[in-house]
Every structure is written in structure tokens, then in C-alpha cells.
Image (spheres, rainbow, N blue to C red):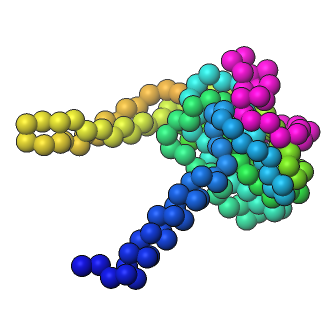
Amino acid sequence: MRTLRQWTGWWLSLISVVAVSCTTPEHAGGGGGTAPREGAFVDFHIDSDDEICWFVAQAPQASGPYKKVFYQTTPQPGRVLRLPVRPGSSFFRVSLVNRVVIETTPMEVTTLPGQITPVAIVLTPAGAVQVQRDELGAHATVRGTIRTRRLEYGPDQSYRLTGLPESPVPFQTIDQMPYSGPDGK
């Protein structure tokens, strides 16, 4: 039997999880949202219809140390990644987990309170490379589930990634931003 202290702890944990999930800023897609009073956002956008898995690191100076602020191994819908940041100047390194990126340069991004700073991500082809793809899966059998692993080797395109920070703009939802449309312009 649970004590009153255990029940209270459980309820407080549940309430805190619900409160945090309701106040988390949007990372992708459209949706509502209001402008932060003291915070700012950076919109990383790419002109590609392919699904993208983002990796973003941030540092207060170009020389580092860089701290991971976003990492995703599953493709994200849409072409925009919106991250909340503190207003001011900081440096970012962006890479794509599901692309062969051989070079990425740090970019200085200046953000203003209550505004969004768009950063255009440009991929420049850098040549063909040989890659190994490791795909994990599972399928059901009469006796249960079997895990499978498939390794593939083959050519792929490598890229140089460049970020082009733009001027900060007033807060809008991602759907309202001009680069979130079907043509990305």
C-alpha cells in the first residue's frame, strides 16, 4: 500500500511533466505559439524536400566549447527547425545526421528578445563517397520478435554545409514564415 508521501510525490511528478510539456516551444511544423517576452528563437531552414535529421551545437565564442542543443536521429517533418535561445550573440555549428557532411563552419547568430533570427542552411555538393549504412529492424514470428540488422555499402553524395544568418524578424508561427512554404522561398 502506498503512503500519502508516495502519492503526493507521484502527483507532483505528473503535474510537473504536464506543465513542462504544455510550455515547451514548438520545434517543427506550424501550430500556435506566442512571442516570448525575454527569449528569442533561431529558425534553421533548408531548401530541401528530403527528410532531415538535425544536429545543432551552440557556443558563446567561435573557439568553443560547443554544447549540443538539439540532436535528432529520426527525420523531422518540414524544412524548419526552431530553437529557443537567449537573446544576444552566440555561435552555432549545424550538421545533418542523415547526410554525409564533410565540412561545416561555425556561424555567428545575433538574436533579439521576442524575435526570430532565420538561418538559411545551404548544402553544396562536395563529391561522391563510399558509405556504410546500418539498418536495424524487427519482425514478428510465431515464437516472438526477431531483431534484424542489415549492412549496406555503397556510394553517396557528400556535402559542405554553410549557414547564412539573416536579420531578426518579429515573432510568427512557423507556418507564417515565408521559408516554410512548399517552395521554401
Closer to the camera in the image, 17 or 146: 17
Kindly tell me whether residue 102 is visible in this rendering: no
- Residue 42, placed above or below residue 142: below
User: From this viewpoint, which residue is outermost toward the left?
Assistant: 142
- Residue at x 7% of width, y 42% of height: 143
Q: Is residue 5 left or right of residue 16?
A: left
User: From this viewpoint, which residue is outermost toward the top?
Assistant: 183
Closer to the camera in the image, 156 or 86: 86
User: From this viewpoint, which residue is outermost toward the front?
Assistant: 4
Quadrant the C terminus occupies: top right
Q: Position of residue 62 (x, y in %)?
A: 82, 58
167 inside magenta stretch: yes
Q: Position of residue 116 (x, y in %)?
A: 83, 43
- Residue at x 65% of width, y 44% of height: 26
- Residue 88, placed above or below residue 136: below
Q: Is residue 33 left or right of residue 39?
A: left
- Residue at x 40% of width, y 82% of height: 5
**Which residues lie in the magenta part?**
161-185
- Residue 67, placed above or below residue 163: below
- Residue at x 62% of width, y 47% of height: 55
